[in-house]
Amino acid sequence: MYEKRFYREYMKSKEFINFTVISKESDLHISAKTNLKKEANKYLKKYRSSIKDYGDENTNFYKSLSPIEVSDAAEEIVKHMAEAGASANVGPMAAVAGAVSQYVGLDLLNYTDEIMIENGGDIFIKTNEKRKILIYAGNSPFSEKIALSISPEDTPLGICTSAGTIGHSLSFGRADAVVALSKDTLLADATATAIGNIIKNPEDIKKGIEYGKAIKGIEGILIIIRDKMGAWGKVEVIAP
């Protein structure tokens, strides 16, 4: 997908070692201070297996577009996906990319003190200095013209994007980019999806922001549709 290549070219840094880990549908680009490909591959397979094992036995987990309850015996990542979906009023799979990014990222922080993982445009980041995250918003005039400034004290942080005009992820809206920020990457992922479903035209920006503001744990929102943009919370928009 074009948006994945875009993020990855921008994320490359001379101070980091950049590598990719792939397992089935999961395709993670990781930037870290040391090559952790072996460890990342192990953790990716572990968490994918947890999700797949539960979903294969409980197919509604895969299919539901609204919140569902999961078994008390489910793995932590499965329960966390369901909780994030419930908070944003979407299905648990709306949080799957963020789930993989965060859970793999937290495990890798045992080996490095800085890391950035991108999974289908959803990012988990822990940094010791300010970073820029460039915003890709399809054909919007804002696309590649703005970036988010991320301060180290705000990390670890999830920065998740949903779009109705680009990419392969399911969205019922027409936003060029909806970005949600949260300490909980799963919540950011689910919330970006939920807000994205609301945005059909520029007049919906306010409604989308109000929806996201009401979700406990969301720290910032950025919405772009065509030539209009709205933001709320801990969102520092800067030149790239």
Image (cartoon, rainbow, N blue to C red):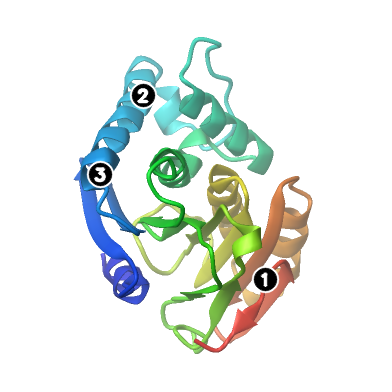
Q: Is residue 58 above or below residue 154?
A: above
Query: Which numbered disc, 3 or 1, marks the residue that appears first in the sequence?
Result: 3
For badge 1, the amino acid type reads: Val
Q: Quadrant of the N terminus?
A: bottom left
- Cβ atoms under marks 2 and 3 closer than 8 Å: no
Say which residue appears at 54% left-offset and 48% top-offset: 185
Percent x, y for residue 136? 44, 76
In this view, the residue in front, 59 or 147, is: 147
Quarter assignment of residue 109: top left
Say which residue appears at 65% left-offset and 59% top-offset: 154
Percent x, y for residue 125? 49, 57
Say which residue appears at 27% left-offset and 48% top-offset: 36
Q: Which residue position holds label 2?
A: 50
**Whether residue 63 is visible:** yes
Q: CA distance from mark 2 to mark 1?
A: 33 Å
Give residue 235's mark: 1
Query: Which numbered disc, 2 or 1, marks the residue that appears first in the sequence?
Result: 2
Q: Which residue position holds label 3?
A: 25
How crowded pointer 3 is (Cα within 10 Å; few <14, some 14-19, many 20+) is rated as few
